[in-house]
Amino acid sequence: MSGVLFGHLWRSQRTKLLIVCVAMAAWNVFLPVIYQSFGSQMKALIDSGVIPKQFTNFGGGDVFSLAGSIALGYVHPIAIILISVFAIGFTTSAVAGERQRGTLEVLLARPLSRTTVYVTLLVAALLFIALVLISASAGTVIGSTVAGVLGELAVDRLPLLWLNGMLLWGTFAAIGLAASVSFDRLTPALGITLAIVVVTYFLDILGSLWPDAKGLQPYSLFHYLASRDVLTGTVDLFGLGLLAVVGAAAVGVALVVLPRRDFAAPS
Amino acid sequence: MDALGTTALTKHYGRREPPVHLPIGHSGGVVRALDDLTIAVREGEIFGFLGPNGAGKSTTIRLLLGYLHPTSGSAEVLGLDIVRDSVAIRARIGYLPGGIALYDSLTGEDLLDYLGALTGRPSTRRAELTDRLEMSGRTLQRTVRDYSRGMRQKIGIIQALQHDPELAILDEPTEGLDPLMQRAFYDLLDDLKAAGRTIFFSSHVLSEVERVCDRVAIVRRGRLVALEDVASLLERRKRNVEIRAADGDMPALEGVPGVSSIGRTADGRLTCQLEGDVGPFLQAIAGHRITDLTIEPAHLEEAFLELYEDAEPDDGSPQPSPTPAAPAGVP
């Protein structure tokens, strides 16, 4: 771990990090308010049969309970795009992007091992994701307070929800970094990582909306982000363990590939 | 002691071994970027590393810095192995990449601070370098994205030398510098050399290699073509000679050692080429009524081109002789 490199990463990302954290907090303020304002009406609408009941299962979230609305906030495309700024954007450009721009040349000319560079990038990515998820939790508490439903929120379960989110997005960050150290161009690294995220997201959403496709859900990493279950008291240790194993495997791949690969002159 | 040395350093790209009957460049899927390079750079010298695009210059530098892993052979930099001790090597050298790319969002000063901190050694030469390369404090406060090509190159030079490295590896260092700055840079190299620093200098600009380097290695198609003193290389170059004599009193130069390509122009001048010791030539013209004598000085460029002409053609046919001018690989 290089403190100097970490400091450089922090300074280069802090404005973006602040914007994403504020946006994430705002988004999570919004959901308890929606639940409090429209939850009962939405439930009545669903119960009337106008909207198919399957739609209430979108990504394991809903707006009929506080836990459901918070869970919906975590799997909604807005939240995914916000977290992806660091879990995908930062990680895939960390090596492949610098390589493409040519700036990796001056970095690798310094007395840093490639493993040190990788570990520093991974720690930075995990820290940025951690701060974004803390902002989400803070937004949830603020939103619940504003909506007057804080009493319904299991505040003591929020750290576990944060951990669940960290394991999912930390795994995607590790996959993004593994792709980044494997390619000379940003496009393939970003493309592969995005494809993994989009496909696994699609499998989970499809499985949640269509009973016949439910069998696909265990193949999606998003399936193991069990926000509603965590907030209502159920912890899927297998799911948490699986995310940790996949993340560790991606870290292992990067630690094998990066020190062994050649960096030819930029074209 | 050598500051840098390679022994049969080889780098091939690709997975399949080449069929033995194929010449270089037709290697059955394997790109032979560098083949059996053996050179030694002495401490305190400025060593020129020459070759056309694709000759293997950048491959060699990248092997020395640990960007690439050698296929075979070995190399040491400052007594350290390039594979085992790559991090330790990079702590003691300075590197200017060719066509350097910098972090555009940083100011020049922040960039130098950042790269200096990553190196982990105090930037003892920065003030001197910024002064000599005319990078004012105001200029260093501007972001790199506002810099011209020449200013970026100056920042590149400063970041490579600011921590006073024992060995500087400079790839096309004067690219983008105006003539005045080039001269300032040459003076800087002279001072570094006087201070006992070693410079490994890759360039396409032969006149500057001739100006600053003590010895040169010339590579082509991944192989060493020549390695010798610049002075020796120039000494052996053919000089163009033109003689005017009164009343047609031309000396007979046939058979004079070092003289070749003797001819006469339409207006009666005698022309020839002269190589090596000029003594026999001067003796041959002594006593004749010479009214004008021109001997064009040999330039490294001519030497360089001559070596290339003698070496393997670019069509990939087999190379007849790897060392037409000097025993390559022997410092």
Image: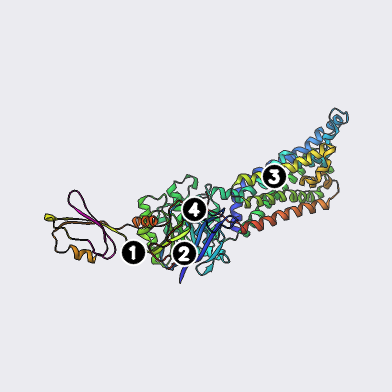
Q: What amino acid is found at the position of numbered circle 3 in the picture?
A: Ile
Q: Which of disc 1 and disc 2 is earlier in sequence? A: 2
Quick one: label 2, few (<14), some, or many (20+) residues within 10 Å? Answer: many
Q: Amino acid at mark 4?
A: Glu
Where does the image place residue B100, in percent across and percent down from the top left? 49, 51
Magenta span: B252-277
Instruction: Please state, as top left, top right, bottom left or bottom right, where the C terminus of chain B lies in the image.
Output: bottom left
Q: Secondary structure at mark 2?
A: strand
x 70%, y 57%: residue: A252
The answer to whether residue B156 is above or below residue B93 is: above
Give how far across and how far down residue B10 sits, in percent: 53, 61
Q: Tell me the tag on residue A83.
A: 3
Q: Which mark is residue B215?
A: none
Do the dots labelled 4 and 1 sit on one chain?
yes
Question: Closer to the N terminus: mark 4 or mark 2?
Answer: 4
Q: Residues within 10 Å of mark 3 (few under 14, many from 20)?
A: many
